[in-house]
Amino acid sequence: MSMPDIVGLLGAAFYLTAYALLQLRILTVDDFLVTVLNVAGGVALIYSLMWNFNLGSLISQVAWLIITVIGYARFRMISRRRAAQP
């Protein structure tokens, strides 16, 4: 098994771990670890796709990564606004 394959499998494991932790209600979508696992999964799978290219998979991984970053940034902005209110 090549290094890109191993990295891709790790990426899938990160995604599945995040999903399982959410579904089992161990974590919530607001937990930082969910974001970290999603970003790590996306980056790992994009790296893997650089070696074994598939356009559909690349588009879905990039979209997943962008949505994760935007969602986390939005959550942080809302949290800061709430904390700043008296």
Image: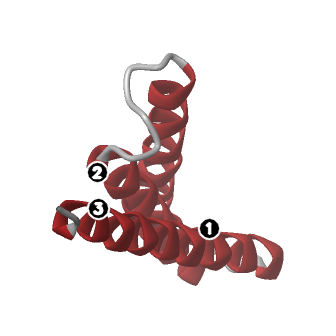
Q: Which mark is residue 29?
A: none
Mark 1 and mark 2: Cα distance apart in space = 16 Å
Q: Quadrant of residue 2?
A: bottom left
Q: Determine whether the residue tagged by mark 1 lies in a helix, strand or loop.
A: helix
The tag earlier along the polypeptide, 1 or 2, is 2
Mark 3 and mark 2: Cα distance apart in space = 18 Å
* Residue type, numbered disc 3: Arg
Q: Quadrant of residue 77?
A: bottom left
Considering the image in quadrants, where does the C terminus appear? bottom left
The residue most toward the right is 56
Mark 1 Cα shell of 10 Å, populated few (<14), some (14-19), many (≥20): some
Tell me what residue is drawn at x 39 percent, y 74 percent.
Answer: 73
* Residue type, numbered disc 1: Trp
Q: Position of residue 85 (x, y in %)?
A: 23, 66
Residue where numbered disc 2 is placed: 32
Tell me what residue is drawn at x 44 percent, y 72 percent.
Answer: 74
Residue where numbered disc 1 is placed: 64
- Residue 59 vs 72, above or below: the answer is below
Q: Is residue 32 left or right of residue 21?
A: left
The colour style of the image is secondary structure
* CB under 8 Å between discs 3 and 2: no
Residue where numbered disc 3 is placed: 82
The tag earlier along the polypeptide, 3 or 2, is 2
The tag earlier along the polypeptide, 1 or 3, is 1
The residue most toward the top is 24
Mark 2 Cα shell of 10 Å, populated few (<14), some (14-19), many (≥20): few
Q: Determine whether the residue tagged by mark 3 lies in a helix, strand or loop.
A: helix
